[in-house]
Amino acid sequence: MSAESGISTFRDSNGLWNSYRVEDVATPEGFAKNPQLVLDFYNQRRKELLSVEPNLGHFGLAALEKYFEVHIITQNVDNLHERAGSINVLHLHGELMKSCSVRNPNLPFDISPDNPEIHLGDTDSHGDQLRPFIVWFGEAVPMIESAIKIVESSDILVIIGTSLNVYPAAGLLNYVRNGQPIYLVDPNDVQTYRNDIHVIKAGASEGVKRLTKLLRN
Protein backbone atom coordinates (compact mmCIF):
# COMPACT_ATOMS: atom_id res chain seq x y z
CA MET A 1 0.00 0.00 0.00
CA SER A 2 2.78 2.42 0.89
CA ALA A 3 5.47 1.26 -1.55
CA GLU A 4 4.53 3.96 -4.07
CA SER A 5 5.15 6.56 -1.38
CA GLY A 6 8.73 5.36 -1.08
CA ILE A 7 8.33 3.30 2.08
CA SER A 8 10.68 0.30 2.16
CA THR A 9 8.71 -2.94 2.09
CA PHE A 10 9.64 -6.06 4.02
CA ARG A 11 8.90 -9.02 1.77
CA ASP A 12 9.59 -7.84 -1.78
CA SER A 13 12.68 -9.07 -3.61
CA ASN A 14 14.61 -6.02 -2.43
CA GLY A 15 12.77 -5.69 0.88
CA LEU A 16 14.10 -4.99 4.34
CA TRP A 17 14.27 -8.65 5.30
CA ASN A 18 17.05 -9.06 2.75
CA SER A 19 19.13 -6.57 4.72
CA TYR A 20 18.11 -7.47 8.27
CA ARG A 21 17.33 -10.74 9.99
CA VAL A 22 13.80 -10.83 11.38
CA GLU A 23 15.15 -12.38 14.57
CA ASP A 24 17.50 -9.45 15.12
CA VAL A 25 15.16 -6.47 14.74
CA ALA A 26 11.57 -7.72 15.00
CA THR A 27 11.40 -10.06 17.99
CA PRO A 28 11.43 -9.56 21.77
CA GLU A 29 14.53 -11.76 21.88
CA GLY A 30 16.32 -9.51 19.39
CA PHE A 31 15.51 -6.45 21.50
CA ALA A 32 16.76 -8.16 24.65
CA LYS A 33 19.99 -9.18 22.89
CA ASN A 34 20.78 -5.89 21.13
CA PRO A 35 18.34 -3.10 21.97
CA GLN A 36 20.53 -0.46 20.30
CA LEU A 37 20.31 -2.24 16.93
CA VAL A 38 16.52 -2.50 17.22
CA LEU A 39 16.08 1.14 18.24
CA ASP A 40 18.35 2.27 15.40
CA PHE A 41 16.38 0.16 12.91
CA TYR A 42 13.06 1.74 13.85
CA ASN A 43 14.54 5.21 14.22
CA GLN A 44 15.60 4.91 10.59
CA ARG A 45 12.15 3.67 9.56
CA ARG A 46 10.64 6.68 11.35
CA LYS A 47 12.92 9.14 9.59
CA GLU A 48 12.01 7.50 6.28
CA LEU A 49 8.31 7.86 7.04
CA LEU A 50 8.67 11.55 7.86
CA SER A 51 10.29 12.15 4.46
CA VAL A 52 7.42 10.77 2.35
CA GLU A 53 3.79 11.60 1.61
CA PRO A 54 0.62 9.53 1.09
CA ASN A 55 0.17 8.30 -2.48
CA LEU A 56 -2.94 8.39 -4.66
CA GLY A 57 -3.94 4.99 -3.30
CA HIS A 58 -4.16 6.37 0.22
CA PHE A 59 -6.05 9.43 -0.96
CA GLY A 60 -8.37 7.25 -3.07
CA LEU A 61 -9.38 5.14 -0.08
CA ALA A 62 -10.02 8.27 1.97
CA ALA A 63 -12.19 9.63 -0.85
CA LEU A 64 -14.32 6.45 -0.79
CA GLU A 65 -15.67 7.64 2.55
CA LYS A 66 -17.85 10.05 0.58
CA TYR A 67 -19.85 7.06 -0.67
CA PHE A 68 -19.25 4.19 1.78
CA GLU A 69 -18.53 3.46 5.41
CA VAL A 70 -14.88 2.51 5.11
CA HIS A 71 -12.83 0.67 7.73
CA ILE A 72 -9.15 0.14 7.03
CA ILE A 73 -7.36 -2.77 8.66
CA THR A 74 -3.67 -2.36 7.96
CA GLN A 75 -0.56 -4.42 8.57
CA ASN A 76 1.49 -1.30 7.81
CA VAL A 77 2.90 0.61 10.75
CA ASP A 78 3.08 3.98 8.98
CA ASN A 79 0.52 6.77 9.42
CA LEU A 80 -0.06 7.51 5.72
CA HIS A 81 -3.73 6.45 5.80
CA GLU A 82 -4.41 8.96 8.56
CA ARG A 83 -2.41 11.66 6.81
CA ALA A 84 -4.47 11.06 3.66
CA GLY A 85 -7.69 11.65 5.61
CA SER A 86 -8.98 8.16 6.42
CA ILE A 87 -11.00 8.16 9.65
CA ASN A 88 -11.36 4.52 10.70
CA VAL A 89 -7.87 2.95 10.67
CA LEU A 90 -7.01 -0.15 12.72
CA HIS A 91 -3.30 -0.99 12.93
CA LEU A 92 -2.76 -4.71 13.46
CA HIS A 93 1.00 -4.56 13.84
CA GLY A 94 1.40 -1.33 15.78
CA GLU A 95 2.29 2.22 14.87
CA LEU A 96 5.71 3.54 14.02
CA MET A 97 5.03 7.03 15.37
CA LYS A 98 4.26 5.68 18.83
CA SER A 99 6.33 4.13 21.60
CA CYS A 100 5.52 2.01 24.63
CA SER A 101 7.41 0.71 27.64
CA VAL A 102 8.92 -2.74 27.93
CA ARG A 103 6.67 -3.32 30.95
CA ASN A 104 3.40 -2.28 29.27
CA PRO A 105 3.51 -2.74 25.47
CA ASN A 106 -0.23 -2.03 25.19
CA LEU A 107 -0.02 1.57 26.44
CA PRO A 108 1.27 3.76 23.58
CA PHE A 109 2.83 7.22 23.69
CA ASP A 110 2.92 9.55 20.69
CA ILE A 111 6.33 10.30 19.21
CA SER A 112 6.82 13.88 18.07
CA PRO A 113 7.94 14.36 14.46
CA ASP A 114 10.32 16.99 15.83
CA ASN A 115 12.03 14.39 18.02
CA PRO A 116 11.45 11.07 16.25
CA GLU A 117 14.12 8.89 17.85
CA ILE A 118 13.96 6.50 20.81
CA HIS A 119 17.26 6.09 22.68
CA LEU A 120 18.56 3.75 25.31
CA GLY A 121 17.75 5.43 28.60
CA ASP A 122 14.47 6.93 27.37
CA THR A 123 11.86 5.81 29.89
CA ASP A 124 8.24 6.25 30.86
CA SER A 125 7.10 7.82 34.12
CA HIS A 126 7.82 4.56 35.97
CA GLY A 127 11.40 4.39 34.74
CA ASP A 128 10.82 1.59 32.24
CA GLN A 129 12.74 1.67 28.95
CA LEU A 130 10.75 2.76 25.92
CA ARG A 131 10.54 0.57 22.81
CA PRO A 132 8.75 0.88 19.46
CA PHE A 133 4.98 0.37 19.63
CA ILE A 134 5.27 -2.50 17.17
CA VAL A 135 3.85 -6.01 17.35
CA TRP A 136 6.94 -8.15 16.91
CA PHE A 137 7.06 -11.74 15.72
CA GLY A 138 6.18 -14.00 18.63
CA GLU A 139 3.96 -11.40 20.29
CA ALA A 140 0.17 -11.43 20.46
CA VAL A 141 -1.79 -9.29 17.99
CA PRO A 142 -4.15 -7.48 20.37
CA MET A 143 -6.32 -5.88 17.66
CA ILE A 144 -7.07 -9.08 15.74
CA GLU A 145 -10.44 -9.67 17.44
CA SER A 146 -11.58 -6.16 16.53
CA ALA A 147 -10.43 -6.78 12.95
CA ILE A 148 -12.41 -10.02 12.78
CA LYS A 149 -15.59 -8.22 13.86
CA ILE A 150 -15.10 -5.60 11.16
CA VAL A 151 -14.64 -8.23 8.46
CA GLU A 152 -17.60 -10.29 9.66
CA SER A 153 -19.93 -7.29 9.52
CA SER A 154 -18.65 -5.83 6.26
CA ASP A 155 -20.50 -5.91 2.93
CA ILE A 156 -17.39 -5.79 0.73
CA LEU A 157 -13.80 -6.85 1.46
CA VAL A 158 -10.89 -5.23 -0.35
CA ILE A 159 -7.35 -6.58 -0.02
CA ILE A 160 -4.55 -4.29 -1.15
CA GLY A 161 -0.87 -5.04 -1.48
CA THR A 162 -0.37 -7.95 0.90
CA SER A 163 1.28 -11.30 0.30
CA LEU A 164 -1.36 -13.07 2.42
CA ASN A 165 1.53 -14.90 4.07
CA VAL A 166 1.51 -13.26 7.49
CA TYR A 167 -0.87 -14.64 10.10
CA PRO A 168 -3.14 -13.96 11.83
CA ALA A 169 -3.85 -11.10 9.38
CA ALA A 170 -4.06 -13.43 6.38
CA GLY A 171 -6.67 -15.47 8.24
CA LEU A 172 -9.15 -12.57 8.13
CA LEU A 173 -10.15 -13.87 4.70
CA ASN A 174 -11.79 -16.81 6.50
CA TYR A 175 -14.37 -14.51 8.12
CA VAL A 176 -15.94 -13.25 4.90
CA ARG A 177 -19.55 -14.35 4.46
CA ASN A 178 -20.54 -16.61 1.56
CA GLY A 179 -21.23 -14.58 -1.55
CA GLN A 180 -19.63 -11.44 -0.19
CA PRO A 181 -17.67 -9.53 -2.89
CA ILE A 182 -13.88 -9.66 -2.48
CA TYR A 183 -11.45 -7.48 -4.43
CA LEU A 184 -7.68 -8.02 -4.47
CA VAL A 185 -5.45 -5.16 -5.63
CA ASP A 186 -1.81 -6.12 -6.22
CA PRO A 187 0.67 -5.79 -9.11
CA ASN A 188 2.04 -9.26 -8.33
CA ASP A 189 0.43 -12.69 -8.43
CA VAL A 190 -0.92 -13.50 -4.97
CA GLN A 191 -1.59 -17.12 -4.08
CA THR A 192 -4.93 -17.75 -2.42
CA TYR A 193 -7.12 -20.79 -1.95
CA ARG A 194 -10.24 -18.90 -3.10
CA ASN A 195 -11.49 -18.64 -6.67
CA ASP A 196 -14.18 -16.03 -6.00
CA ILE A 197 -11.85 -13.02 -5.76
CA HIS A 198 -11.99 -10.19 -8.29
CA VAL A 199 -8.32 -9.45 -8.98
CA ILE A 200 -7.16 -5.98 -10.02
CA LYS A 201 -3.55 -6.47 -11.08
CA ALA A 202 -2.14 -3.03 -10.43
CA GLY A 203 -0.30 -0.99 -7.85
CA ALA A 204 -2.10 0.84 -5.09
CA SER A 205 -2.76 4.12 -6.90
CA GLU A 206 -4.01 2.67 -10.17
CA GLY A 207 -5.71 -0.22 -8.40
CA VAL A 208 -7.72 1.99 -6.05
CA LYS A 209 -8.70 4.15 -9.04
CA ARG A 210 -10.09 1.08 -10.85
CA LEU A 211 -11.67 -0.21 -7.64
CA THR A 212 -13.46 3.09 -7.07
CA LYS A 213 -14.92 2.98 -10.58
CA LEU A 214 -16.15 -0.60 -10.07
CA LEU A 215 -17.69 0.12 -6.66
CA ARG A 216 -19.39 3.33 -7.74
CA ASN A 217 -20.91 1.57 -10.78
Image (cartoon, helix red, strand yellow):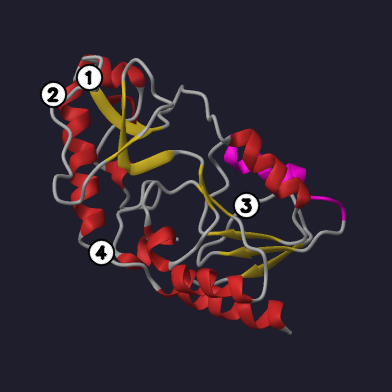
- Residue wearing tag 3: 191
- Which of the two labelled residues, at mark 3 and mark 4, occupies the earlier sequence position? 4
Between the residue at mark 3 and the residue at mark 4, the CA separation in whole angstroms equals 30 Å
Between the residue at mark 3 and the residue at mark 1, the CA separation in whole angstroms equals 41 Å
Q: Is residue 173 magenta?
A: yes
- Residue wearing tag 2: 120
Give amino acid for label 4.
Answer: Val
Drawn side of residue 217 relative to residue 167, left or right: right
Seen in the picture, residue 144 relative to 175 is either above or below; the reply is above
The numbered disc on residue 148 is none
Drawn side of residue 92 relative to residue 49, left or right: right
SS class, disc 3? loop
- Residue wearing tag 4: 52
- Residue wearing tag 1: 129
The residue shown at (69%, 40%) is 148
SS class, disc 2? loop
Q: Nearer the viewer, mark 3 or mark 4?
A: 4
- Which of the two labelled residues, at mark 4 and mark 2, occupies the earlier sequence position? 4
Between the residue at mark 4 and the residue at mark 1, the CA separation in whole angstroms equals 29 Å
Where residue 50 sits, quadrant-wise, is bottom left
Residue 72 in percent (x, y) is at: 56, 55
Report the magenta stretch's main SS: helix
